[in-house]
Image (cartoon, rainbow, N blue to C red):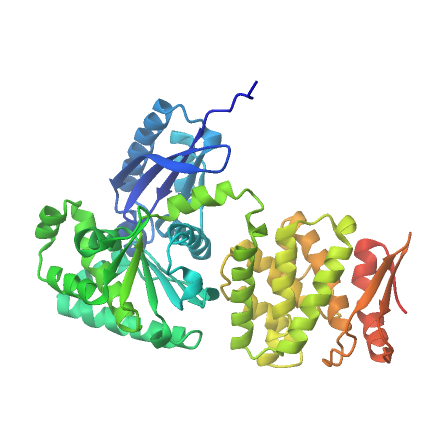
Amino acid sequence: MNAKKDPPRLEAVIEIGATGIRLLVAEVSDSGGWKVVDRAERALALGRDAFTTGVISRESLLQCLAILNRYREMLDGWDIRDEHVTVVATSAIRESRNRDSILDRLAVKTGFRVRVIDGIEENRLMYLAVDYALSGAPDTLANNNSIIIDVGGGSTEIMLLQNGKMVAAHSFRMGTVIIEQYVKAMAGSTKDMRRFLAEYVTTTAENLNNELKLNLVGQLVAIGSDARLVARSVGIQVTDLFAVIRRDDFIAFVNRISGYSVEECVHRFRISYGEAETLLPGLLAYQFFLEMTAAETVVVPYLSIREGVILSQLAGPAHLVREDFYAQVVASALSLGKRYLLDEAHSAYVTRIALKLFDSLEGEHGLDRHARLLLEVSAILHDVGSFIRASDHHIHSQYIVAHSDIFGLNRDDMVIVSNVVRYHRSEKPQPTHMAYSSLPRSDRTMVLKLAAVLRVADALDRGHSQHIEDFDIELTRDTLFLRARGTHDVTLERLALSEKCDLLEEVFGYKLIMV
């Protein structure tokens, strides 16, 4: 007799954005398959408040509450319980000075616990959605130099991929609402908007060119409702999940609507007045970026950050175990290191040794795969501060990492990595080190364990010569033995270990001996 299968479950995602609040309901099967069964969208210009006055007004809050309570009724109709509802907020709430009070009122009045995500987390979710949409296409991300762009209401998210490998991920505080408000404040025309955007894109492109030459980019992936509108109008449907638009057709469409009034856009495209106001700024931004590349087509996925949330959930809490995604994080870290002229041979050696130590101590540290990823990123970047000054380079490394973006790592991750790289030398954490002492206890413990491992790995290449090709690890009751393979003079490494093994011995309780 066949076992009875559980019915598909329903998962809901609500996104509180700068221009509206959007709901997605997906039916998820036990096998991991899913399909969208319901959508809803309500326009709400939270971004106009956040990006002009710095706070979300009482009137906007009341509208937000009304929309969320309407969505609550819809979810009740679907019989979806709160543990299957994810509510995320992006740039508008993220940048509001009254963010905490807004989140509290939303929780009290609607029951929804809202998670505010940063720009790099948006990039991660977008990448999941794009990768899924293009997975069955002949021209996948892996086959091209690609630039993925999402021009949102309050920020522009950009990812650069070289032959499918992540080169960089950035979140810029420039979106359609900000552009529109700037032009209005200056009493400018469409011509002024074009000049303003052209200057912004040119400046941004100069920085991006240091990471990936845009004239070698053969594929531009445009995410967002503005790009989807163009795809529906002049695009070619390739699959149910994405369309392509010829370069000339995209530019011609943008030039054509430049002559439309807001009212004409509302009538022609059946969009809200608020969407019509920000349509041209968004499409002009895409156009200017397109013209910086060699791409002959614009790829438009029909998925969004909301589908990215569903995909992230389906991968489980340990989604970074996925080797393709894991590799993208590492590639982004390597790209950052190269910008600061890291010693690639030393960095690669220390990384390999650190990961071997981590894996050998698996039964001792109690850390997961994500912690291993943070160690790998820390090992890659531990010496980037030497770009500023060799002496005290650990402090400069901490600063560089703390103020950089790495694809797939959120702000909390970057704070952990920045602390690990600081303590890769002889210095130990102190109560006066605020970047460390302000961390939650669990994160401080992780920093100690990862830094202890990284210090040993760095000591084993004290001379940056990599002459110890490999070593064996043996754990006894109270001693960790490192046995170098081959016949090498390890005097320098023994000396370095004597200076840097103290943290590992304190954290793990083993005496470290190199034989």
Residue 428 horizontal side relative to residue 488, left or right: left
Q: Residue at x 34, y 69 (%)?
A: 218
Q: Is residue 188 visible?
A: no
Q: Quadrant of residue 142?
A: bottom left
User: Is 307 placed left or right of 1 in the picture?
Assistant: left
Residue 235: % across, % down? 21, 56
Examine the rendered structure and indicate whether residue 400 appears above or below residue 116: below
Residue 325 appears left or right of 490: left
The quarter of the rendered structure image containing the N terminus is top right
Residue 103 pos. (x, y %): 42, 40
**Residue 508: x %, y % from top left:** 81, 54
Of 400 and 470, nearer the camera is: 470
Q: Can you tell which quarter of the image residue 139 is in?
A: bottom left
Q: Quadrant of the C terminus?
A: bottom right
Q: Quadrant of residue 260?
A: bottom left
User: What residue do we see at 75% from left, 70% from top?
Assistant: 426
State the residue lying farthest toward the front.
1
Report the number of discs. Answer: 0
Residue in front for this viewpoint, 236 or 477: 236
Task: Tell me, yes or no, if residue 240 can be seen here.
Answer: yes
Residue 70 image offset from top left, x and y in percent: 30, 29
Q: Is residue 1 above or below residue 372?
A: above
Q: Which residue: 33% across, 53% down? A: 54
Q: Nearer the viewer, residue 26 or 184?
A: 26
Task: State left or right for residue 447 relative to residue 315.
Answer: right
